[in-house]
Amino acid sequence: MMVIPAAEVTVNINQEQVKDFIEEQLQKQINQQLFLVDINKLSEMTCMSKSFLEQEILHDPRMKLLERRKEKGKRFWFYEESLNVIREIMDEWQ
């Protein structure tokens, strides 16, 4: 009987790359499902407080164009367009 020596296999995993990949895939799934967001969701997604959003982002004329509300009701913004405008606003901070 012939004995085959055991092979040693080493797998190196870059945990940061795995984490980034998972976050990217999750973000893609979220993006495909969201149509509108309210201030609470914007706050959660951007890690910005509601008061900061109000002062620095939501009063910008570009965001005002995206705002939807029926009379004095709750405000909503179109998700994808809002992210693009927020990115533009933040790019101006540099």
Image (cartoon, helix red, strand yellow):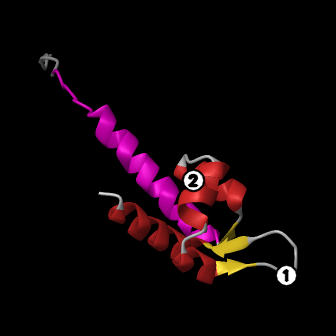
Q: Which amino acid lies under the numbered mark 1 shown in the image of this protein? A: Lys
Q: Gap in Å between the C-alphas at discs 1 and 2?
A: 24 Å
Mark number displayed over residue 70: 1
Q: Is residue 20 left or right of residue 83?
A: left
x then y, percent, for residue 89: 43, 66
Q: Which region of the structure is painted magenta?
A: 8-34
In terms of depth relative to the viewer, which is nearer, 55 or 8? 55
Q: In the picture shown, does residue 70 fall above or below 56?
A: below
For this orientation, the residue located farthest to the right is 72
Callout 1: SS? loop
Please name the residue that numbered disc 2 is placed on.
45
x then y, percent, for residue 44: 62, 49
Q: Is residue 1 left or right of residue 33?
A: left
In terms of depth relative to the viewer, which is nearer, 77 or 32? 77
Question: At 53% across and 59% down in the image, what residue appears?
Answer: 56
Please rate how many residues cluster around mark 1, counting C-alpha atoms within 10 Å: few if below 14, some from 14 to 19, many from 20.
few
Q: Quadrant of residue 71?
A: bottom right
Mark number displayed over residue 7: none
x then y, percent, for residue 15: 32, 33
Q: Nearer the viewer, mark 1 or mark 2?
A: 1
In the picture, the quarter occupied by the N terminus is: top left
Please rate how many residues cluster around mark 2, counting C-alpha atoms within 10 Å: few if below 14, some from 14 to 19, many from 20.
few
In terms of depth relative to the viewer, which is nearer, 90 or 4? 90
Residues at circles 1 and 2 in contact by the CB criterion of under 8 Å: no
Is residue 5 highlighted in magenta? no
Question: At 42% across and 54% down in the image, what residue appears?
Answer: 24
Q: In the picture shown, does residue 74 fall above or below 68?
A: above
Q: In the picture shown, does residue 55 fall above or below 62?
A: above
Question: At 17% across and 18% down in the image, what residue appears?
Answer: 6
Q: Quadrant of residue 77?
A: bottom right
